[in-house]
Image (cartoon, rainbow, N blue to C red):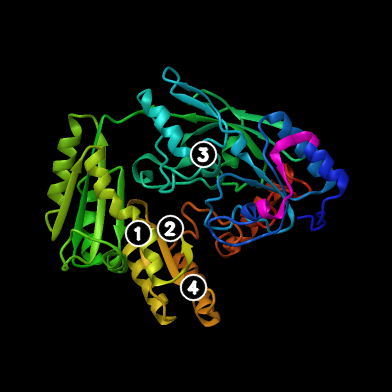
Amino acid sequence: MSGEYITALTPEHKKFLVDLFGDGVAFDPEVLRVYASDASLKVGAVLAMVRPVGVEQVCEFMRWAEAENVAVHPRGRGTSLSGGCVPTVPGIVVSMLGMDRILDISAEDFVAVIEPGVNTARFQAECEKLGLFYPPDPASGKATSVGGNVATCAGGLRAVKYGVTRDYVIGVEAVLPGGKLLKFGGRSHKDVIGLDMGRLFVGSEGTLGIITKLILKLIPKPEASASVLVGYPSLDAALASMSKVFAAGILPCAVEFMNETVLEILGKTGDVPWPQAVKSLLLFQVDGSRGTVPLENARLSQQLNDALWRMEGVGKEEEDNIWAYRRRVSAASYVLGPDRIGGDMAVPRGSLLKAVRRFEEIAASNGKRLIAFGHAGDGNIHANLHYDASDPDDTRRTEKTHHELDAAALEFGGSLSGEHGAGFLKDVSKQLGKEEHSLMRGVRRIFDPRGILNPGKGY
């Protein structure tokens, strides 16, 4: 990366930005404080915030930014837990929330064309009105933007059956440093001409260009769904039961797990319906046609006959009541401390139990409690550690634990991140080989020779 970025804006710089963006630019420190951080709660230095409303503004801004060697930090809704939106060097934050139009949803092509600032949940709701389905389902979908999901290749609850964000991106329009507008892919679901350059942007964490338009594949909306929350005496018993489900040839659209610590904090922070003998939970959802869902639900229930307790729901209202317990986990976890470091490691599904137990041992050896939950169907573990940042010793032990958890995930043949991305909080060199890492950096330099885009992030 360049390392020679400007550190302050001149009056000429500010005039250019005001002329280009009008009311969509901010220099006020009180306003910029919002854009200096994200959900990771890390803080960087912001010289200005700009909010484009059209691709022409983005092109002109990126031409200027490269010429002036200004660090550019693309931003969606700031929900990154890995510091993906936090400036590592002073620069200009480009908020894409001004480009939030749904341009087309086609029931004939099974395609949607949208701008990156569109809210994920809003987009899914508009698709469903037409009987269409956009499956990627990050748990924070009500807060995220689709562009942000693309930047990190978000997965979510339904990934075990439907895949992740990259599986639905078939076209990308993006502006590179220097102002070049490039278009990759299109509305065709099948296209094997040339390299799939658009896919490079999925998971690139804002390092290759600023996405201005997305073409997304849609599928028919499932007619029905059913969910079941089942309780076990231990995580060991729960995951053994999950293995029976997959062995029986059943593919749920979602499988979530919660370890013993999760049930403890849920019990401390609100009412729970399960008996005290239940120490671990699995949460399943099946979907499909009105005729097949009852059959799939019956097959699923048959494999869960060793559960101590169960709570079933069919249809949105009943299922929402069940899923509310899973959604409570993040908020309830703060009972263990006011600050959090969150991991989202992924391991091979068959190693999930061993990995969680190893993580718990590592946490205990440092005097910490591990909150482990997540997407059991694809081995994605949300390994959260809570602490008090005002206590230097607690902070040190928590950070040490986090690094040791990352190392343990790799020992199981896993990944440092299953869906949140690396941001600047994960050392990807621990996972990537030297030559592989060098190749990725080389690709990055082709798109961004001066290294102005999100320096210090990702790879």
Residue found 58% across the figure and 59% down from its top? 432
* Residue on which the image places disc 2: 346
Dots 4, 3 in contact, CB < 8 A: no
Magenta segment includes 30:
yes
* Residue on which the image places disc 3: 146
Label at residue 243: none
Q: Kindly state the secondary structure of the residue where label 2 is placed.
A: loop
Distance of label 4 from label 3 (alpha carbons): 32 Å
Q: Kindly state the secondary structure of the residue where label 3 is placed.
A: helix
Badge 1 amino acid: Val
Q: Position of residue 303 (x, y in %)?
A: 15, 51
Q: Quadrant of the C terminus?
A: bottom right
* Camera-nearest label, 3 or 2: 3
Earlier along the polypeptide chain: callout 4 or callout 2? 2
* Residue on which the image places disc 1: 329
Magenta residues, start to end = 19-32
* Residue on which the image places disc 4: 404
* Camera-nearest label, 4 or 3: 3
- Return the residue nearer the eye: 75 or 240: 75
